[in-house]
Structure formats: C-alpha cells, structure tokens
C-alpha cells in the first residue's frame, strides 16, 4: 500500500442504515476494506458486482480519512485488500488499515 496508508486509494461507499459507509468484504475470519489503486478499477468492480446503482466510488483524502478509519475501527476491520478482482477472486496486495 502507498506508504502503508489508505489515503490516495479509492473505496466504494454503500448505504448503511442511512449513512454512506465503506464496502467491506469477509475473507476467512476477517472483515476487509476493499480499496482500489484508481477510480477506473473501483468502477469496474462496481459494474461487475452489479453495485453501480447503489454505490459510489470515492477517493480517500486527508479530509475524509478520519471518517473512513472510524467506520473501519467500529466494524473491527482486519485490514485492506487492494485491487480486488471480482472475476478472478484475487487481489494485488493486502495490508493493515491506518
């Protein structure tokens, strides 16, 4: 991950109980943030997962980073999977979230 931070990565926001929340995925015994290196990859995932109508891609920047991290802490996310590919069920890299 870029310097170990999710800042600069793209995430997918979905509606959760009336608020926008990062899309998380269960892998093994953990819950992981799905993040993408660029907006095109995030939108491709949304299209392949049929989420384009109910989700939006968003760049993680300094101003929204604390909110994203707060949700991940609340959900007890184990880490982040970067550039998850829906078709092959693979990802480019994984790391801790901070």
Image: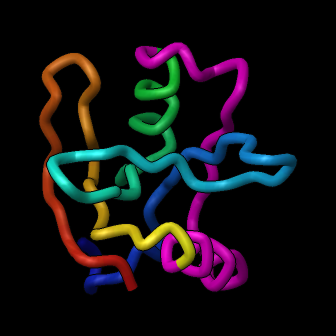
Of residues 92 and 97, which is closer to you in this image?
Answer: 97
Residue under the point 63% across and 52% down: 58
Q: With respect to residue 3, does 80 lie above or below?
A: above
Tell which residue pokes out farthest to the front in this image.
Answer: 29
In x, y percent, where is residue 21? 66, 55
Taking 17 as reference, is 98 above or below it?
below
Residue 74 percent coordinates (x, y): 56, 75
Q: Answer above or below: position of 22 versus 14.
A: below
Q: Residue at 71% of width from left, 18% of height from top?
A: 53
Q: In the rendered view of the protein, which quadrant contains the N terminus?
A: bottom left
* Quarter holding residue 82: bottom left
Q: Quadrant of residue 94?
A: bottom left
Please check the rendered image and state whether residue 65 is part of the magenta-colored stretch, yes or no. yes
From the viewer's perspective, tell me whether residue 84 is left or right of residue 54: left
Q: How many marks?
A: 0
Which quadrant of the structure image shows residue 61? bottom right
Quarter that holds the C terminus: bottom left
Rendered location of residue 60, percent (x, y): 57, 67
Q: Residue at x 16, y 43 (%)?
A: 91
In magenta, the rendered stretch is: 48-73
Is residue 36 rendered to the left or right of residue 78?
right
Q: Tell me residue 17's x, y (percent).
A: 80, 47
Picture residue at 35% right of the left edge, 53% below the top? 37
Asked if residue 82 lies in the magenta stretch, the reply is no
Q: Is residue 12 above or below residue 51?
A: below
| Left or right of 53, for residue 33 | left
Q: How is the image coloured?
A: rainbow
């Amino acid at each position: 991950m870029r310097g170990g931070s999710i800042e600069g990565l793209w995430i997918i926001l979905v509606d959760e109980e009336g608020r926008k929340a990062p899309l998380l995925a269960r892998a093994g015994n953990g819950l992981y943030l799905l993040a993408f290196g660029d907006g095109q990859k995030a939108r491709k995932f949304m299209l392949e997962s049929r989420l384009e109508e109910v989700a939006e891609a968003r760049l993680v920047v300094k101003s929204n980073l604390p909110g994203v991290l707060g949700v991940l802490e609340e959900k007890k996310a184990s880490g982040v999977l970067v550039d998850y590919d829906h078709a092959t069920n693979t990802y480019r890299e994984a790391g801790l979230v901070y």
